[in-house]
Image (cartoon, rainbow, N blue to C red):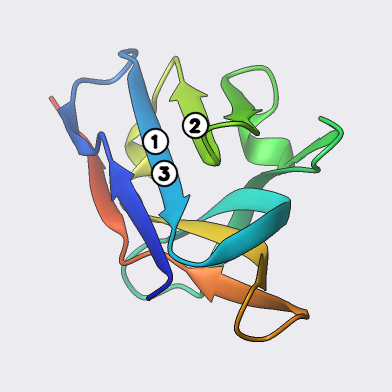
Amino acid sequence: QVQLVESGGGLVQPGGSLRLSCAASGGIIRVRDMGWYRQAPGKERALVATISSQGSTNYADSVKGRFTIFRDNAKRTVSLQMSSLEPEDTAVYYCNADLLLFSALRYDNYWGQGTQVTVSS
């Protein structure tokens, strides 16, 4: 069974840092694009950052210069290093990945279960 398991969320003070991690597992042949999205209360889910299998990155304007996305292709993990956190960064953060599975032989898009990040003093 395919799983994207996130970890690293929690409560942090404004200006602080936090790292989120996500590991993909379960019948995977290859991982293409990976990324992080977030959903704040009352808002739609929105892109935070993505990274291709070759390492090309894309960031939302609101996090540029503060967040860094990176991945380990061998371990099939993607991480998000968040710095200079602001209360506006409070949201549930979701891992996302395009996975090629043995069972499907095509790329499909998968989501993690989400991890809460709260920035508050």
Q: Which residue: 69% across, 54% down?
A: 31
**Residue 73 occupies which quadrant of the picture?**
top right
User: What's the distance in space between the residues labelled 1 and 2, CA to CA?
Assistant: 4 Å
Q: Mark 1 and mark 3 in contact? Answer it, CB < 8 Å.
A: yes
Q: Which residue: 28% across, 20% down?
A: 14
Residue 29 located left or right of residue 90: right
Q: Residues within 10 Å of mark 2 (few under 14, many from 20)?
A: many
Q: Mark 3 and mark 2 in contact? Answer it, CB < 8 Å.
A: yes
Amino acid type assigned to the residue bearing label 2 in the image:
Ser
The picture places residue 70, in percent across and down from the top left corner, at: 62, 26
Q: Which residue: 61% across, 30% down?
A: 71
Position above or below: 57 against 102 = above
Give SS at disc 3: strand
Q: Residues within 10 Å of mark 3 (few under 14, many from 20)?
A: many
Give SS at disc 2: strand
Closest to the observer, 105 or 44? 105
Position above or below: 86 against 15 = below
The picture places residue 106, in percent across and down from the top left corner, at: 78, 80
Q: Which residue is mark 1?
A: 21
The picture places residue 60, in percent across and down from the top left corner, at: 71, 44
Residue 66 located left or right of residue 14: right
Residue 51 located left or right of residue 9: right
The tag on residue 79 is 2
The picture places residue 90, in percent across and down from the top left corner, at: 32, 46
Nearest to N terminus: mark 1 or mark 2: 1
Residue 47 located left or right of residue 6: right
Nearest to N terminus: mark 3 or mark 2: 3
Q: Mark 1 and mark 2 in contact? Answer it, CB < 8 Å.
A: yes
Amino acid type assigned to the residue bearing label 3 in the image:
Cys
Q: Which residue is mark 3?
A: 22
Q: Which residue: 64% across, 38% down?
A: 62
